[in-house]
Image (cartoon, rainbow, N blue to C red):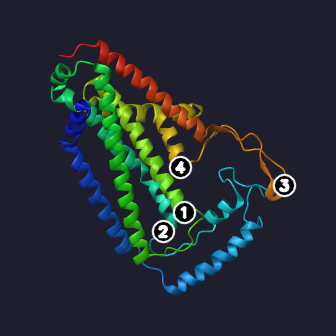
Amino acid sequence: MRLLRSELLRARSRRLVPMLIIGGLLGIVVGMGLTAIYGGEASDAEIATAQTQYDKDFAQCMKGRFLEHGGQLDPRYASLEEFCRDANAPSLDGAQLRDLDLIVQGISTFVVLLGTLLGASLGGADWTNNTMTTLLTWEPRRARVFFTRALVVVAFVGVITLFLQVVFSAAYWLVAVTRGTTLFLPTHFWTDVAATVGRVSAMGVALGLVAYVIAMVGRSTVASLGVLFGYLVLVEGVIAGFRPTIQGNLLVRAASVIVSQQPILDPTRELVYYGSGVSGAVANPPILMDVHRAWIVVAVYLIVLGGLSLFQFRRRDVS
């Protein structure tokens, strides 16, 4: 507990932590302010007209009128009702609260990058400041030091990413109430938003831990960020572009699948439909990575990289 309290105090004292929080809050204020000012506002008559048209389109969609592929349901949707509620959303001026879930998914990249930066900084700070020797003199059990620092990364990244997303959601709700509309909400809207926020924070924590273990190997914040950036460009970008089939084994792709809950389909294969009408389905969807596999991929990356990092931390001299 003394080590944990010490690491929490050390992490809280990092200038980067309040800077990221204040920067995130300023970004939310500026973004929501611009949305409120320039987003326009739908009139009552436009909202009433949109509601009437939405009800009409939804009823037609539930009869299978808007389905493509010979009347087959898109495999990304669990039910016809879910498809119809998403496919027939009216377009109005101003912020629409129903878009919040997609917007949170859209900003997930920045949230995960924030977690990555925090993890790299908290893992590499003591190496950069040459205080790791002092820490190990006080607490020589390196495995305990390694896991305690990892726990601090989980706590800080999880709390900060959750806090910023909750503030963003509250700000968007306020803008939608005052300058937009809160109508046309899907079923279980707030439950879906809360689940998305949780998944984004979980991926922020996961990438933060990856950055942390790499920083412990490279003994530098810059080294961690450099390795991750190189991996993102070379592996996730270039190699995946030439060999699309490896996308089912990539870390960032897995995080994206978990956040969006949408599988990655194999671009080298075509969808094969069978049946007819609304009851039709897809025969053997060409899925490279589904949500279940994505969680496994993230876990494997964490276990393998964490094990390698702990091994070298215990074996390598500190000077």
The mark that comes first in sequence, 1 or 3, is: 1
Callout 4 secondary element: helix
Label 1 to label 4, Cα distance in Å?
Answer: 15 Å
Residue at image location 26% in from the left, 60% down from the top: 26
The three-letter amino acid code for the residue at tag 4 is Ser
User: Which numbered marker is on residue 97?
Assistant: 2
Does residue 100 sit above or below 177 in this rendering? above
Residue located beneath label 4 in the image: 260
The residue at the point 42 percent across, 37 percent down is 206
x then y, percent, for residue 221: 26, 32
Q: Quadrant of residue 188?
A: bottom right
Report the front residue among 120 and 154: 154
Is disc 2 in contact with disc 1, using a CB cutoff of under 8 Å?
A: yes
Label 3, secondary structure: give it: loop
| Distance between mark 4 and mark 2 Cα atoms | 18 Å
Q: Which numbered disc, 3 or 2, marks the residue that appears first in the sequence?
A: 2
- Image-quadrant location for residue 16: top left
Q: Mark 2 to mark 1: distance in Å? A: 10 Å
Cα distance between the residues tagged 3 and 2: 36 Å
Say which label, 1 or 4, has the lower sequence index.
1
Classify residue 200 as left or right of residue 247.
Answer: left
**Of 244 and 133, which appears nearest the observer?**
133
Along the viewing direction, whichever of 151 and 166 lies nearer the viewer? 151
Q: Is 276 placed left or right of 67 in the picture?
A: right
